[in-house]
Amino acid sequence: MEQRELGKSGIMVSKICLGTMTWGEQNTEAQAHEQLDYALANGVNFIDTAEMYPVPPCQETYTRTEQYIGNWIKRRGRRDDFVLASKVAGPTGANNLDSYIRGGNDFSRAQIIEACEASLKRLNTDYLDLYQLHWPERQVNFFGRLGVSALAENERFTPINEIVDTMGELVKQGKIRAFGLSNETPWGTMRYLNRHEADPALPRAASVQNPYNLLNRSYEVGMSEISLRENIPLLAYSPLAFGVLSGKYRHGAMPENSRLALFERFKRYTKPQGFAAVERYAKIAEDAGLSLTALSLAFVTGRAFVASNIIGATTMEQLRENIASAEVVLPNDVLEAVDAVHAEISNPCP
């Protein structure tokens, strides 16, 4: 499988990344290990997780996904032949979560170091290739929220300089190779890059993990130019829009044990205009002789600003199809048809 450099970090990652956020909720540990074995045997060298996983997050399952991966690493060994990424959770209050993570977490030096060391222990590894800030501490648009038109008068958040300095400490200690951003904005991304430019001895943000799919191409408004010009590529998450772009929810279907059936909170991609766009994209896929899943994933993977497409699966059948999408290259006429739909139904599910 093709590998791409993670920004300027020197780290090479497969263009398909194995996402893990269902492990410990919708997937057992044995199923997680089966997915890991299959993915690595089929060209995927990149695994993405987070201290907060599985999703939906709750205190009872907090860190369970990392524990599953850590047990697999302990059994398997050969740590240096794959790239492992994890994330330190942003403030739980900003994500409407209870304050069960370190009693109300932030991105202060003490909390980042504590979180990183705990992740390393759970994952049974001495280092992380990529350590990401899961969502900003400050008030911004993320997780489908729109409309930040004013800032709180007494808004406080850890200075970006302190965050980058802390990541620099972790790099020097050999605990991480690079750090990345997630659910970030143009303003935030440039501030992180500027910190490195002001002091090149400090680490440079390597990547941005944001949502990107046929129903939510909002990354192209501002962020994609930064990715291309500054060489800080996207790690695209939710490429199938919580499964909506697999087609399994078409015409009102609600498969048993699917994510939308199990968890009422996942409504981000269930808007009427989103389903209208799905029907249009399904017709394009059919005319091209592709499944809707293959079309949706190949579109994301083929973007010039994407380093890796983070796929997730609850069944081996899904995993096989998702990884196989790496072989699909969309011809120009299909891309033009996709853009025509996007022009008429633009970002229906941001």
Image: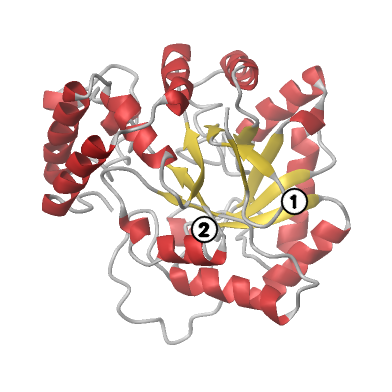
- Res. 158 visible in picture: no
N-terminal of the two: label 1 or label 2?
A: 1
Q: Quadrant of the N terminus?
A: top right
Of 165 and 305, which appears nearest the observer?
Answer: 305
Q: How many marks on residues?
A: 2
Mark 1 residue element: helix
Q: Position of residue 311 (x, y in %)?
A: 47, 32
Q: Which residue sits at x=34%, y=19%?
A: 257
Q: Which residue sits at x=13%, y=35%?
A: 280
Give the residue at the far front of this rendering: 332
Q: Is residue 303 left or right of residue 121?
A: left
User: Could you say which disc has been placed on residue 271 in the image?
Assistant: none
State the separation of the CA atoms marked 1 and 2: 15 Å
Residue type highlighted by circle 2:
Trp
Q: Which residue sits at x=45%, y=38%?
A: 56
Residue 52 vs 21, above or below: the answer is: below
Quadrant assignment, res 151: bottom left
Q: Residues within 10 Å of mark 2 (few under 14, many from 20)?
A: many
Of 176 and 300, which appears nearest the observer?
Answer: 300
Location of mark 1 (residue): 116
